[in-house]
Image (spheres, rainbow, N blue to C red):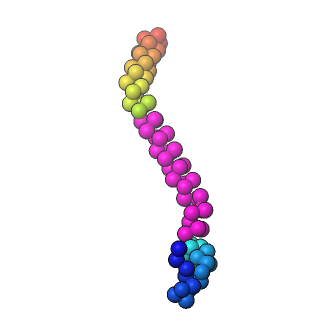
Amino acid sequence: MYSGALLGGSANFGDTPMYKLVNRFRRDQQGAALAEYGLLVALIAVVCVVAVTALGTQISTAFSTIASDLAGAL
């Protein structure tokens, strides 16, 4: 195993700024949570589009029938 002390460096890699930076990003969960919320919103949007596309014509036909029946009753 490499010893940083051989080249005049510290033998403990946990004290280096790069090691601390990498550990900070590894522990940070805010970005992961934001990405999960983004995926959730995208999934909900896809479900809404599919539902409207699949049911849109049936709902339109039902409202047209109701409107014509109400117009005939008046």
Magenta residues span: 22-49
Q: Tell me which residue sits at (59%, 59%) in the image.
A: 30
Q: In the rendered view, tell whether residue 19 sits above or below residue 70.
A: below
The image quadrant of residue 61 is top left
Q: Is residue 71 at least partly visible in the picture?
A: no
The percent position of residue 7, horizontal first and vertical second, equals 52, 87
The percent position of residue 5, horizontal first and vertical second, equals 57, 85
Q: In the rendered view, tell whether residue 11 sits above or below residue 24.
A: below
Residue with the most extreme top position: 73
The image quadrant of residue 54 is top left
Q: Tell me which residue sits at (50%, 45%) in the image.
A: 41
Question: In this figure, what is the number of numbered marks?
Answer: 0
Q: Main secondary structure of the magenta part?
A: helix
Q: Is residue 71 left or right of residue 36?
A: left
Depth check: 63 or 69 in front? Answer: 63
Q: Is residue 48 left or right of residue 31?
A: left
Q: Is residue 45 at least partly visible in the picture?
A: yes
Q: In the rendered view, tell whether residue 23 sits above or below residue 46.
A: below
The image quadrant of residue 67 is top left
The verdict on residue 10 being magenta is no
Q: Is residue 72 left or right of residue 29?
A: left
Depth check: 74 or 22 in front? Answer: 22
Q: Tell me which residue sits at (54%, 55%) in the image.
A: 32
Depth check: 48 or 36 in front? Answer: 36
The verdict on residue 29 being magenta is yes
The percent position of residue 56, horizontal first and vertical second, equals 40, 27
Depth check: 70 or 40 in front? Answer: 40
The percent position of residue 38, horizontal first and vertical second, equals 50, 50
Residue with the most extreme bottom position: 8
Residue with the most extreme front position: 1
